[in-house]
Amino acid sequence: MSILPPPDTGFDLDVPILIVGAGACGLVAALTANDAGAEVLVVEADAAPSGSTALSAGLIPAAGTRFQREAGIEDTPELFAQDIQKKAKGENPQDLVDLLAEKSGTVIEWLADKFDLPFSVVTDFDYPGHSRRRMHGLPTRAGRELIDRLRTACEAQGIDIICNRRATSLFAEGDIVKGVRLEGPNGTEDVGCGTLILACNGYGGNRAMVRKFMPEIENAVWFGHDYNQGDAVTWGEALGAETLHLGAYQSHGNVAHPQGILITWAVITQGGVQVNLNGARFWDESQGYSEAARAVLAQPEGIAWTIFDSRIAGIARQFQDFKDAEAIGAIRTADTLTKLAEVTGLPKDALTQTITRIPTDGPDVFGRSFLGEPLKPPYCAVKVTGALFHTQGGLRVDQDARVCKTDGGVLKNLFAAGGAAVGVSGSGDSGYLSGNGLLAATVLGHIAGSAAANDMKEEHGHA
Ligand SMILES: Cc1cc2nc3c(=O)[nH]c(=O)nc-3n(C[C@H](O)[C@H](O)[C@H](O)COP(=O)(O)OP(=O)(O)OC[C@H]3O[C@@H](n4cnc5c(N)ncnc54)[C@H](O)[C@@H]3O)c2cc1C
């Protein structure tokens, strides 16, 4: 049962603020609440903080930061909000978009200043749909570094993170959450709490929910964290919470196959193309990497080859994933298109025609315009497929990240953020703007942590 009455025998432990999930969202929420003077406990199902956050490139979009100003980039939350809504065709709740865009800069600078996260802005290529360069990342441009630095910051602040504890049920009395049942190596433990923050991401690891809400991507490789089982949605719905856009997700159509390594979309935005096993292009790649999964999976064998050149490989090499893909031979190189056909097994004449016919002025037959330099030898190619990265639907939250109910009220002491809450990616797979995932994880996590700490202060008469 997902919702239980509080145990007759009381709880094994009581904490003011309990956070389920130690991804970017949970750890940012914990740092924020702790910074505001509240006592927090984070519980995590996995053996160590990791989550989808560790699998990501760790790039967080933010507008109006000093990192942008230092790089000569003028940006505003309003522009950012417009970009988010444009990509999602205006399908997102405007108040949520405005909130995330408005607070994004503050959160990045706060993490940098308070916890020494050395962010810099990506300045050498554009992400589709972003009208300004606003992706902020750590030196390795890898989510592993982001989660490790957040965990180190939590440890330095004395925040307890208990791993190997999966929350299996919530305790509630009416609308009020009372605690959580955890399963761990020593059996079950019941933890009571004043406030609960759900930071346990979405439902991409739950095949039944994927089949139900997004059947078109059911057969894609699952690339996110396996513990993302949709617990927030299951618990929320049982408590009368409102959900939104459960069919929304981010996928990626540039995952090296069979190695399963993410190949940065920069190889496309810089002028690369995708061809199918017949050596033919099949879509306008500039639409974005999320839509690319559906486009690639619809090709023979669900496979494509992404073709680019050594100049572009030089840019992609700032990503550890790309370097890893090169190190294990996933990236093939050749001095001529004939040799490229040999190393990929693609039909030589078709491949040559496809690459030599890429227009340098004006749009191609798919409507894509190539504004950068044309592809030049030596050429590079990587065999790719489509993967599901994470879901974007979830619990509807208010401006404090408090969970909204279907009857118009809120669940007073239940917060949701990151992949547990509805994101700002519209209702399907094409509304995802790069970075929407970590934007919701870090910014909404910060908002949830701050509001939860405020509630605690008010409750104890310190406000
Ligand atoms: C390959 C890949 C690349 C990506 N690249 C980017 C990118 O560059 N930029 C970007 O913005 N987004 C990116 N994303 C998306 C981004 O990773 C997620 O949106 C973000 O990490 C979500 O953070 P989170 O804290 O909500 O979830 P997570 O990081 O997944 O953390 C949730 C945690 O909750 C735990 N958990 C779940 N259920 C329970 C339970 N019942 N009890 C206890 N613990 C539980 C899980 O074990 C997990 O550790 C990428 C995703 C993938 C898969």
Image: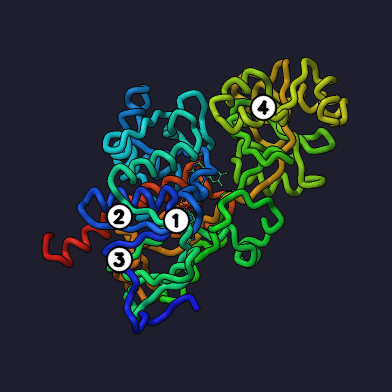
Which element carries disc 3, helix, strand or loop?
Answer: strand
Mark found first going from the N terminus, 2 or 1: 1
Q: Which residue is mark 4?
A: 327
Q: Which residue is mark 3?
A: 195
Closest to the observer, 197 or 183 = 183
Mark found first going from the N terminus, 2 or 4: 4
The numbered disc on residue 163 is 1
Counting other residues with Cα less than 10 Å from the Cα at mark 4, is it few (<14), some (14-19), or many (20 or more)? few
Q: Residue at 33% across / 46% down in the picture? A: 154
Q: Position of residue 255 (x, y in %)?
A: 66, 40
> Can residue 322 be seen from the camera position used here?
yes
What kind of residue is marked 3?
Thr
Do labels 3 and 1 touch, CB within 8 Å? no
Q: Residue at 15% across / 65% down in the picture? A: 460
Mark found first going from the N terminus, 3 or 1: 1
Q: Which residue is mark 2?
A: 449
Q: Position of residue 199 (x, y in %)?
A: 42, 57
- List the single residue furthest toward the left: 462
What kind of residue is marked 1?
Cys
Which element carries disc 4, helix, strand or loop?
Answer: helix
Closest to the observer, 363 or 156 = 156
Q: Position of residue 125 (x, y in %)?
A: 52, 26
User: Which callout, 3 or 1, points to the residue nearer the camera?
Assistant: 1
Q: Is residue 261 found left or right of 227 in the rendered image?
A: right
> Can residue 77 be seen from the camera position used here?
no
Mark 2, ligand 1, within 8 Å: the answer is: no
What kind of residue is marked 2?
Gly
Do labels 2 and 3 touch, CB within 8 Å? no
